[in-house]
Image (cartoon, rainbow, N blue to C red):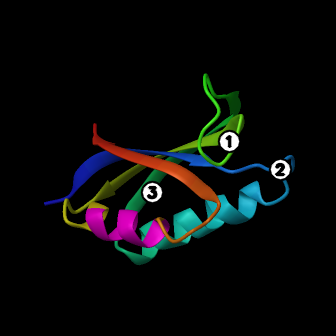
Amino acid sequence: MKRKYEGVYVLKMQGQEEGIEDTVGSITKELESSGATLEQIDRIGRKEFAHTNHAKQSHGYYVQFHFEAEPDLIDGVETRLKLNEQIMLQHYRKR
């Protein structure tokens, strides 16, 4: 049975926003190819971090995906997206 999820991704910017759309596109492809049905994509934008992380990043670009998927899909998508160097953080929760 499909459930509704929210996925938040923090993308590396490295001073340029040109690659943001490519990374959002790759996340979209990964979710859809895994069987998720996208409902909405919110580009929240650039946010400063309270603390610099281990990679000396002081900010990131936040994107929120609303989608419907089978519960076992989340683990597989999360594992595959960990390989994408442009994604610093990803978090999923049921809506």
Instruction: Tell me where residue 32 appears, x and y as whole percent.
Output: 44, 70
Identify the disc placed on residue 61. Answer: 1
> Camera-side residue: 71 or 16?
16
Classify 10 Å Cα crowding around label 3: few (below 14), some (14-19), many (20 and above): some
**Image point (28%, 47%), residue name:** 4
Query: Secondary structure under badge 3?
Result: strand
Q: Going by the picture, which residue comes out furthest to the left?
A: 1
- Tell me how far mark 3 sits from mark 1, CA to CA: 20 Å
Which numbered disc flags the more N-terminal residue, 2 or 3?
A: 2
Magenta part of the chain: 75-81
> Camera-side residue: 11 or 63?
11
- Residue placed under numbered mark 3 in the picture: 38
Q: Is residue 15 above or below residue 27?
A: above
Instruction: Tell me where residue 41 appears, x and y as whole percent.
Output: 56, 47
- Residue placed under numbered mark 2 in the picture: 17
Instruction: Tell me where residue 38 appears, x and y as whole percent.
Output: 45, 57
Q: Is 5 part of what is drawn in magenta? A: no
Classify 10 Å Cα crowding around label 2: few (below 14), some (14-19), many (20 and above): some
Q: Are marks 3 and 1 in contact (CB under 8 Å)?
A: no
